[in-house]
Image (spheres, rainbow, N blue to C red):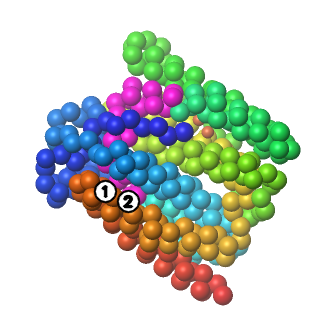
Amino acid sequence: MFRHSIRTVLVGLCTLAAASQAVTAAVAADTPTASDQTASVAVRPLNPQTLADLATAMKGEAFAYASYNLFAAQAGREGLSRVAVLFRSTARTELNEHFREAAALAGVVGSNEDNLREAINGESYEHETMYRQFAEQAGTDGDAQAAELFAELAADEGHHRDAYRTALSVLTSGHGAIPAPPRADTVQVPAGPIQVKSARTKANLDTAMHGEALAYAKYMLFAAHARQTGQPALAQLFAGTADVELHEHFAGEAVLAGLVGITKENLRKAIAGERYEATTLYPGFAAQAMAVGDISAARYFRDTAADEARHAAAFQQALDRLR
Ligand SMILES: [Fe+2]
Ligand SMILES: [Fe+2]
Ligand SMILES: [Fe+2]
Ligand SMILES: [Fe+2]
C-alpha cells in the first residue's frame, strides 16, 4: 500500500516556468525529485491536501495503466487490433506521464535506502494486516476462492518484505548480496463475470488491485533510480517484484473481480472513468491546489484533466466504430 512521506518537492522560489521545466526534465530523465539531489531548488512543502490529491491521482493513474493493458489484451483476443493499440498507448500515457509527473511533484522517489524502507513498510502492512484481514473476511463471507488468493498474496508479500530487508542491510552494511528478483507467474485475464458473492469481498478486491497497481508503478520508479545510481542488482529486485505485483497479484485479483468484460463494455467503463477525471476529479484538485498557491500542482491537475478529456473522446470514437 502506498504511504509516502513528504520529501523534498520541486516547487520552490523558482518561477513557475522553471519549476515546470524541472518537473518535465526529471520525468523525461526518469529521475523524479530525489532527496539525495540536495543541490536543486529551494524547498516549499506542498499543502497536505495537495499531497493527498496527488496520492489519489497516482493511485488512479496506476490503476488505469494496469486495467488498460488488460483491456488491450482482451481487444486482441477479439481481433480488434486498433482498439488494442489505443488501450496500450493510453496506458503508457497514464504511467509514463500522469503517474510519473504526480510522483515527481510529490517527491516519491528518495535514496535507494529510503525507497527500500518505503517498500518494506508497504509490504509489511500488506503481509501482516491487509491481506490477512481480507482473507479472513472473504472466508467469513463464503468467498472461498478469494480467501485462498488473499492468503497466498499475504505469503508472497512476506517474501517481498524479507528480500527488501536483506537488500537494505546489504546497502547499509556493505556486506552480502542483493537477493535475486522473484519470478512472476503471469495470470491471463480474459473477459469474465465477477466471481465473488459478498460486497465486502468485492470492495476488498478493489482496494487490493489499487494497491498492487500502485506498488508496480512505484517499484518501477525505484528500479530506475537504482539503475541510475549504479545498483543494477537492486534495480532487478525492484523490477522483478513490480512484475509480480502487476502480472500475478493484480491480474489474479482482476479475474475474481470480473474487471475485464468484452471490449464494448471495457470501452464504456474507460469512457466513464476518463470523463469523471476530466470533468470532476482533476478540475476539483486543480482549484484546490490553486487556492493554496501550489501552482505547479494546479497546472499538473489542469493539464491532466485536458488529457483525460482527449482519452474519453478517443475511446468514444473507438466505441462508435464498433456499433
Ligand atoms: Fe491519466
Ligand atoms: Fe509485494
Ligand atoms: Fe502484491
Ligand atoms: Fe486517461
Relative to 13, 211 lies left or right: right
> Type of residue at label 2?
Phe
Rendered image quadrant of residue 182: top right
Label tally:
2
Write the residue at 23% across / 54% down: 293
Rendered image quadrant of residue 155: top right
Magenta segment boundaries in residue numbering: 95-121
Q: Which mark is residue 243?
A: none
Q: Position of residue 146 (x, y in %)?
A: 78, 44
Which is the main secondary structure of the residues drawn in magenta? helix
What secondary structure is found at the residue carrying circle 1?
helix
Q: Position of residue 132 (x, y in %)?
A: 71, 32
Write the residue at 57% across / 62% down: 68
Q: Nearer the viewer, residue 150 or 317?
A: 150
Q: Which mark is residue 285?
A: 2
Write the residue at 57% across / 76% down: 82
Q: Which mark is residue 289?
A: 1
Q: Is the N terminus in the top left, top right, bottom left or bottom right quadrant?
A: top right
Relative to 6, 144 lies left or right: right
Label 2 crowd (10 A; few <14 / some 14-19 / many >=20): many
Q: Position of residue 202 (x, y in %)?
A: 72, 52
Q: Nearer the viewer, residue 82 or 96?
A: 96
Write the residue at 34% across / 30% down: 111
Residue projecting furthest to the front: 291
Relative to 257, 57 lies left or right: left
